[in-house]
Structures are given as C-alpha cells and as structure tokens.
Image: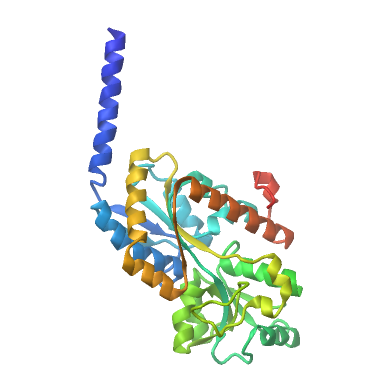
Amino acid sequence: MKHVMFGAVSALVLGLSAAHAQDFPTKEIQGIIQWGAGGSTDTVMRSVTPHAEESLGGTVVMQNVTGGVGAIALNQVANGKADGYTLLMGAENPLLYKVMGLGNKDYSDFTPINILARGTAILVANKDAPFDDYAGMVKYIHDNPGELRLGATGPGGLPSVITAMMNTVEGKLDVISVPYDGDGPALTALQGGAIDVMPAVLGASIEGIRAGTMKPLAIFATEASDKLPDVPTVVSFNEGYSKYLPWGPFFGVFVKKGTPDDVVAKLTAAYSEGAANADFVQLMDTRGFTMMDISGDEAQEFLAGWQSSTAWLLQDAGLTKASPEDFSIPRP
C-alpha cells in the first residue's frame, strides 16, 4: 500500500509541475534592471523584452533598481523566490563583486536565461575638451595632474576596468573620478560638461557621437569598428593594450538558482525568440553591439571565462580587495 501511495504522490507532483510549466506565467513578471534609464543595459533589456513577451504570452514589468554597482538589484532578486517571476536584467559587474569586496554573491547564484549581446568599450570626451584623441588626453593628464574629471560607475564597472587597463599600460594617471549610477547618467553629465571623459559602451554613446554632442577618443579593441571606422583603436596609440584585448561588457537575463527547470526552459525559449527578432537584431547592429543569444552550458562557460580574465586583470593592476584565488577563480 505504501508503494501505491508513493507512486500516487509522485504522479501528483509531476502533474502539478507540468501544469505549472503549461500555465506559466499566471501573473506579471518583474524585470529588475541593474542600471539606470538610458544606459546600455536599460536599452538592451527594454528593446528585447517586448519581443520575448509575445512568445511568453505574459507581461514583464521592468524597473530600474540602481546602487551598489548593481548589487542592490542583484540582492533583491537573490533574496526573492526562485519561481521565475523575478528576472535580473544585468551586465557583467556581478562577476567582480567578490574580488572587489562588494558582496558574496555573483552569477553563480543564478541561472542564465540568455546572454543577449556584448559591447565594445570606447573612450569619449566632452565636445569642448582641449584634446581630440587618446594621445592628446594622456598628454593633458600629464601636463595638468588632478584636473581631468573621469566618469565612473563604481568598482567593477566598465569604467573601472578600462581605467585599470590605462593605469597598467600608461602608468598611474592622476585624474578625478566622478561616480554615477550607470553610463546613461554619466554620458548625460559628460554632454553637460560636468565631466570631461567617460569610458563607456559603444552602443550607449554612438548616437551622441553621431550627433556631435560628444567626441570619441579611442575604441578599446584591436580592430576599428565598422560603425565608426574613423575612430582609432587604442592599440594604435599604445601596443601595450593588445595584452588585454579584446574585452567588453555583456548584457543578460537571469533567474535565481533553483527556479524550476520547466520555467527556465520557457523563459529561455522566449528570450531566445526575442533576441532573434529582426527589429532587435537591427537595433543591436546599428548601436554597435555584437549579438550573442546564448544560454545553458554555453552561457555558463562564457561567464566563467569572462570572470577569470577580468578578475585577474584587476588583481594584477592592484585594484582588488581579495585575490581571485580566494574564490577558486582560475587565472586564464
């Protein structure tokens, strides 16, 4: 009799799970965006999600939750239920939280739904800055120590990684670091003259460059961008950067680890379909983003490789609070 009851209970559980997958979502899904409005993460998520909603047959309500270099948003999702009704819409920053002393969680506490795209870093300046390229900026910094105002988004953000590269390759640059809640607010400040230079994502700055409201100094890549072919690579100014490139940020959708596999599968299918939408693909191409659209083991391997290379870059630059070794992050 006990075996019969156990079989009946198992069948009931499996039946409920299947029903859950079939019915999901039965209510609004919350999309928690790590960074502020108008930035690259915000742009990617608000562009792809409407297309994912069509496949999902549900509504995703997106909210910008800023602060703590994205850690506040991450912890909000990590502390919630693992039911698929709260999505973390983030960038690369969490993979550096542990070594930067910003928290004890990273994407190992989540399941990647889709790594949608990656970006290229670029250094842009206020249109009235007294230099027109990377070499001119470096000379200005040396001639005017402690005067140049450089935008930042906190430890582990793209600007901090690019700044680490510059300090490693050029030697310590004496600048004033001015923090913002994402590249969107920082680029707005740049155009208004509150800061002089900003390391940013090409996709977030390209429209301002095209409009002439900011000027590009160098692309952090080994080859020029076909979207801005006249902008020189940073390697053309200093070959020392080739050791660290290619490098770039990325943007992905995650759920808390432990979310039912069937719900993960449904969300993954929806965001993969959204990423394949022609309008989204065209927007990403126009903005200079590189499509990825990866999930599962492929996404996990990408995350591990990115964390390894970047954490050790910051460690070697003397910018980490703890060694990657302390967290079993292998040197690349």
Q: In terms of depth relative to the viewer, which is nearer, 213 or 275?
A: 275
Task: Say above or below: 261 vs 72.
Answer: above
**Residue visible at 37% across and 60% down in the picture:** 275
> Going by the image, does 236 lie left or right of 108?
right
> Going by the image, does 127 lie left or right of 99?
left
Q: Where is residue 271 shown, x and y percent of the image? A: 35, 55
Asked whether the viewer can see residue 62, the reply is no
Q: Where is residue 44 shown, x and y percent of the image? A: 40, 66
Q: Where is residue 85 shown, x and y percent of the image? A: 33, 48
> Going by the image, does 40 lie left or right of 237?
left
Task: Say above or below: 60 vs 174.
Answer: above
**Residue visible at 29% across and 28% down in the picture:** 14
Determine the image quadrant of residue 221. bottom right
Asked whether the viewer can see residue 152, the reply is yes
> Going by the image, does 2 lie left or right of 237?
left
Quarter holding the N terminus is top left
Q: Where is residue 24 shown, x and y percent of the image? A: 26, 44
Q: In terms of depth relative to the viewer, which is nearer, 121 or 243?
A: 243
Task: Say above or below: 30 vs 282.
Answer: above
**Residue visible at 27% across and 52% down in the picture:** 56
Count of numbered badges drawn on the protein: 0
**Residue visible at 54% across and 73% down in the picture:** 200
Determine the image quadrant of residue 167. bottom right
Determine the image quadrant of residue 265. top left
